Image: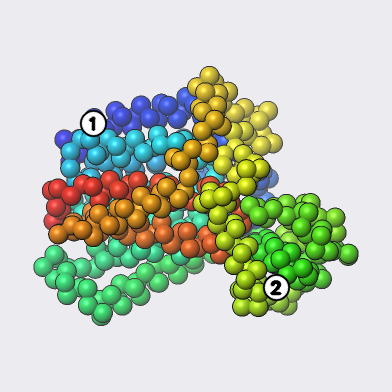
Amino acid sequence: MIKRYGLGLAIIALLIALFYVSAFYPGYMSFDSAHHYQQLETGEWTNFQPVIILLFWQVTNSIIEGPGGLYLCFLSIYLISLWLIACYLQGGWIRRIILLLTALFPVSIMLFPHIWKDIGLLVFVLLAIGCLLYYLSNNRWWALLASLLSLAVALLFRFEAVLYLWPLLFFQIRQATRKNNANLAANRSLHFLLRDGFLVIVFAVLVLFGNQALVKVTDTKKITLWPTIALWDIARVSIRENQVLMPDYTVGVGMTVEDLAQATHSWTNTSLFSNTKAGVNNSLATPYTPEQYKDLLVLWVSLPIKYPQSYAKHRLQLMRELMRVNEDPNKPQDLFWCNYITNYNDRFPANSSLLNLLVNLLLKRHKDSIVFKPWLYVIIAIMVVIYILRQRQITVQQRLAMNLIICSGLSLVVMLFLAPAAEQRYLIILFTVVPIAACLAWATKQPLS
């Protein structure tokens, strides 16, 4: 496949890389990115972000100081992964070129230039898919191992991703444990399904312990982040219930429902911790006691049971904002993209080329068009599933496409409960994987062995 298509596709990938470098280098840094880099420079690491991104950034920063090195690193992995997927996609030139050009989809252009852990998650998921396709075509054990390792690295960038990427992991393990195509039907028995399901759990646990090992080896200070989501959920439910449900140790004296209402928004949790008059302690600066953490967790988990209607309305309202259905028109641009470098623009100026200005102008003008709406990708995903199920014989690549669609759907379910804001980057798997799955489903010729 590489001999036939590799060079031509590589030229297209290089042209795409030239566009991304010309338009966006050294990338964008939001508040989170700037906080990560501050930790990198001071050496005072915390698990406010996954340790893995600091490790990558530490290496690239020793070569190219600032965001530029990590931007080029992620961009290289991104385009190499798409090139690899395109090379081993079934079918001819057209579908391969279309798959590569997904890097130029408007949503990709909007999200990818940022130095975010979400980008790290994305590029290593794509690398896992590319290595997996290489394995399916060439039956090289090391390619499957590379695919599994790539997914492990991806999971280290966002811990909750294991809740929606496990179908891809399950597919990888199925390919690793099945003996040959002749006994594939036998491998679908309950015994083998349970075996592979157990291996998925073992893999996820190993990744979790791997992260804990990274935290220990790098002497990273542990902080507890989940209260930032929990308090927001409790505050929004408090507003609907017209009573302050937040524990006394989390709020200042005189906290009222009116104070919570004027400080919070349906699309983000950050305003809760900066806009109230009474003040809110999110435990990042002043940690709670173990008993307080336990009490807060119990309260958070019990919200859907004690206040099901208010909790559901709050979370569904966030999902409407996230899916951009009847969304509030006053949402800030930062929920979509940040075309700046927070706190470090004097040292690392953001790209201000004519191409960059033109791209940002087009994004601002068309960000409300249909191509940026997440619900469009849900519709495409449903159409892909229907198309696959209507095939007389489903190919291996179509089974992979189906698993990727399931991953996308599960990511929405996870975000329904865990998303702290309606930021479009939280749907980066949906935006990126669905078009790739569509290409895999469409390419039905040349069945793989």
- Per the image, label 1 sits on a secondary structure element best described as helix
- Per the image, label 2 sits on a secondary structure element best described as helix
Which colour scheme appears in the figure? rainbow
Could you say where residue 383 lies in the image, as x and y percent from the top left? Answer: 31, 53
Residue at image location 55% in from the left, 26% down from the top: 361
Please tell me which of labels 2 and 1 falls first in the chain.
1
Could you say where residue 129 lies in the image, as x and y percent from the top left? Answer: 32, 51
CA gap, disc 2 to disc 1? 57 Å
Q: Nearer the viewer, residue 178 or 161?
A: 161
What residue type is disc 2 on?
Leu
Q: Residue furthest front?
A: 326
Could you say where residue 45 lies in the image, as x and y percent from the top left? Answer: 64, 53
Q: Which residue is mark 1?
A: 7
Could you say where residue 65 lies in the image, as x and y percent from the top left? Answer: 57, 33
Tell me: 198 left or right of 69: left
Q: Quadrant of the N terminus?
A: top left
Q: Residue furthest left?
A: 182
Question: Up-down: is 49 above or below 91?
Answer: below
Q: Quadrant of residue 149?
A: bottom left
What residue type is disc 1 on?
Leu
Question: Up-down: is 36 above or below 65?
Answer: below
User: Can the viewer see residue 211 in this picture?
Assistant: no
Dots 2 and 1: beta carbons under 8 Å? no
Q: Which residue is mark 2?
A: 296
Residue at image location 54% in from the left, 30% down from the top: 365
